Amino acid sequence: DVKVTQSSRYLVKRTGEKVFLECVQDMDHENMFWYRQDPGLGLRLIYFSYDVKMKEKGDIPEGYSVSREKKERFSLILESASTNQTSMYLCASNRRDRATYEQYFGPGTRLTVT
Amino acid sequence: RKEVEQDPGPFNVPEGATVAFNCTYSNSASQSFFWYRQDCRKEPKLLMSVYSSGNEDGRFTAQLNRASQYISLLIRDSKLSDSATYLCVVPQNTGGFKTIFGAGTRLFVKA
């Protein structure tokens, strides 16, 4: 059974803080994704990684960076958190040969920036 | 026009009712489509895929209309446990990774 875990379910940070969100998957998936989900806007892709140390910008990469040093781990970094980054952050993964097929999601991290 | 648009919910239906949601997409080259279900404060999970004319799984039927560029999800004999948000998902099939998620349609099934 595929499992995607995220380091925190709830997180409260102050404006200007550096924030790390961690995601780990245990199915040896090549592809990993970071999305944010906001009411009325659906899931929006922040960054995508298709291999270790490889990354591609999604639709809304501004204010974020990512790191993929190991295949199973994909980190999202908010260099200087701002209130407009308050959101639900979802990590997902799937196999490279099924890049446009089912994605497996983690439980999400609800981040509040005050 | 948004790349993927869904019926605005919420849909409030009694148990046993039949309910249908629509989702329109703008990329005529899209080949595959998905419905995900997301329970309150939970992650999205795949419900059904739609590759050609349609797909049926028990009480759930997903249909594709390529000419009009929409997919639909029909739920028959609604259960209380069907209450959730249903996300329409359209991979872009551009050789890359982009998948467009709709904003979701919320369904409430009441006793």
Image (tube, rainbow, N blue to C red):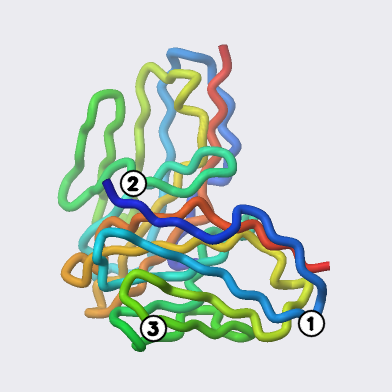
Q: For mark 3, what is the residue? A: A69
Percent x, y for residue A92?
A: 40, 62
How many badges with numbers are in the image?
Answer: 3
Chain ID at mark 1: A
Against B40, residue A3 (above or below) is below
Does the residue at mark 3 contact the one at mark 1 (Cβ under 8 Å)? no
| Residue at the image point whose x is 35% and y is 22% from the top | B76
Percent x, y for residue A77?
A: 58, 79
Q: Nearer the viewer, residue B6 or A70?
A: A70
Q: For mark 2, what is the residue? A: B46
Task: Please name the amino acid that badge 2 sits on.
Answer: Leu
Residue A97: image quadrant is: bottom left
Disc 1 on helix, strand or loop?
loop
Task: Please name the amino acid that badge 3 sits on.
Answer: Glu
| Residue at the image point whose x is 49% and y is 75% from the top | A75
* Mark 2 on the same chain as mark 1: no
Q: For mark 1, what is the residue? A: A16
Chain ID at mark 2: B
Percent x, y for residue A1?
A: 27, 46
Task: Please name the amino acid that badge 1 sits on.
Answer: Gly
10 Å crowding of disc 3: few (<14), some (14-19), many (20+): few
Disc 3 on helix, strand or loop?
strand
